[in-house]
Image (cartoon, helix red, strand yellow):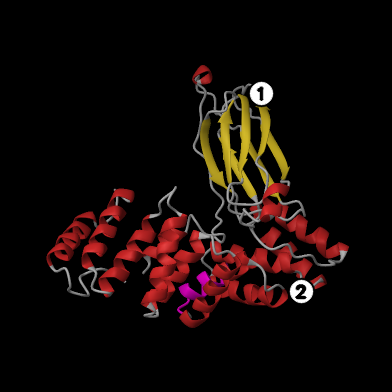
Amino acid sequence: MKRLTSAFQTLLLTSIIFSAAAVYNSTAEAHSAVVLNRIEGIVWDPYRRPVRDLYVELQNENYFALTRVRTDSTGRFSFIGVSAGRFNIRVITSGTNYLEYNESVDLVSVVRGGSDAAYLEIVLKLDKSKVNSGLAEITDAIFVQDVPEGARKMYHKGLKDMEKGDLGLNEIEEALKIFPTYFDALNTLGTHYVSKKEYQKSLAYLIRAVDVNQRSFSTYYALAYAAYELGHRPEALDAARAATILQPKSFNAQLLYGTLLRMDHSYEKAEAALTEAEKLSKNRPVPEVHWQLALLYNKLGRNQEAADQLEIYLKLQPDAADRKGIQDTIARLRKDSKKKFVSLNH
């Protein structure tokens, strides 16, 4: 089941690991100059809270996509090694209730040993038509607290200093000393430690965050994942269920919930969650969804369907580590159409 870890690592809110973009060297300036240009920034929601796990796309002056990264747990993004020129930054907000955001950025020519940098503070706006119609999935329920000014300033300072490691974390801890029930601070530290695989450390913050705010999808999701990694399956299952209730259209939540249900031998409910995850990820298929469905169908003795799912998995994951072994398993599943417990890993 450690496949789940690798598949989710790039998908979780929680997940939310600071990405480095590909390096783009201008052919016009390929004369051994070191290109150190960078574009970075933070994406905020209308209430000045960082928005995690949104795609930010780097486009050239003709709006052709060059690369994209996801915002991390503090809303940050970065493109490093960008050539000189004019670029467009696009924040992709599909699946949320935010309006899409675009901004042009100019980077000056780079001389030997020099560089240019652009820093963007992006504040997203709500798409009122989607909010009113209920068509969009909300990233997290709006939660308002009367936070003391000292705690608020220390928290935002910590967010900006997160790149500096312990300094930013210590500043957020200081905010919590001033205001112990500061939800944003608790949630930020909890999800940060999940992204760093420090699951035990994350639990204290996430449990306190849930006590303060029972409507946060990101907190429940991170709590479910941390509990799963620590082997606390009943707690993980409860938290994952809560996440699917808060955001039933989140394929990440349905996938984690379905996986935990399968491990709990609740096969009918597991199939409902996993097939929902498959539908929700149809436009951008996720290999792990099909791996989990294959495991489930094999347990149910539906080996033809299990083989179908493994074939889809291999198409989506052509560099699978044990490709030959999976192909052999597919052949056995086709041959033993009713036999359970074919050599699929759990």
Residue 198: image x %, image y %?
Answer: 54, 69
Residue 167: which numbered mark, if any?
none
Q: Position of residue 288 (x, y in %)?
A: 38, 59
Asked if residue 127 shows in the view, the reply is no
Q: Quadrant of the C terminus?
A: bottom left
- The residue at 63%/35% (across/down) is 89
Q: Main secondary structure of the magenta part?
A: helix
User: For the residues carrying marks 1 and 2, which lies nearer the camera in this image?
Assistant: 2
Residue tagged 2: 181
At label 2, the amino acid type is Thr
Mark 2 residue element: loop
Considering every residue shown, the one lying at the far bottom of the view is 234
Q: Is residue 140 magenta?
A: no
Amino acid type, label 1: Val
Is 225 covered by the magenta stretch? Answer: yes
Between residue 4 and residue 28, name the one nearer to us: 4
Q: Of all residues shown, which one is farthest toward the top?
A: 28
User: Which residue position holds label 1?
Assistant: 108
Residue shown at 51%/30% (left/top)?
24
- The crowd level at tag 2 (other Cα within 10 Å; few <14, some 14-19, many 20+) is some
Residue 39 location (% of width, % of height)? 63, 36
User: In which image quadrant can residue 146 be found?
Assistant: bottom right
Residue 180 vertical placement versus 157 (above, below): below
Query: Can you tell which quarter of the image residue 119 is in?
Result: top right
| Boundaries of the magenta span | 222-231
Q: Position of residue 105 (x, y in %)?
A: 67, 30
Q: Residue furthest left?
A: 335
Who is closer to the viewer here, 113 or 219?
219
Secondary structure at numbered mark 1: loop
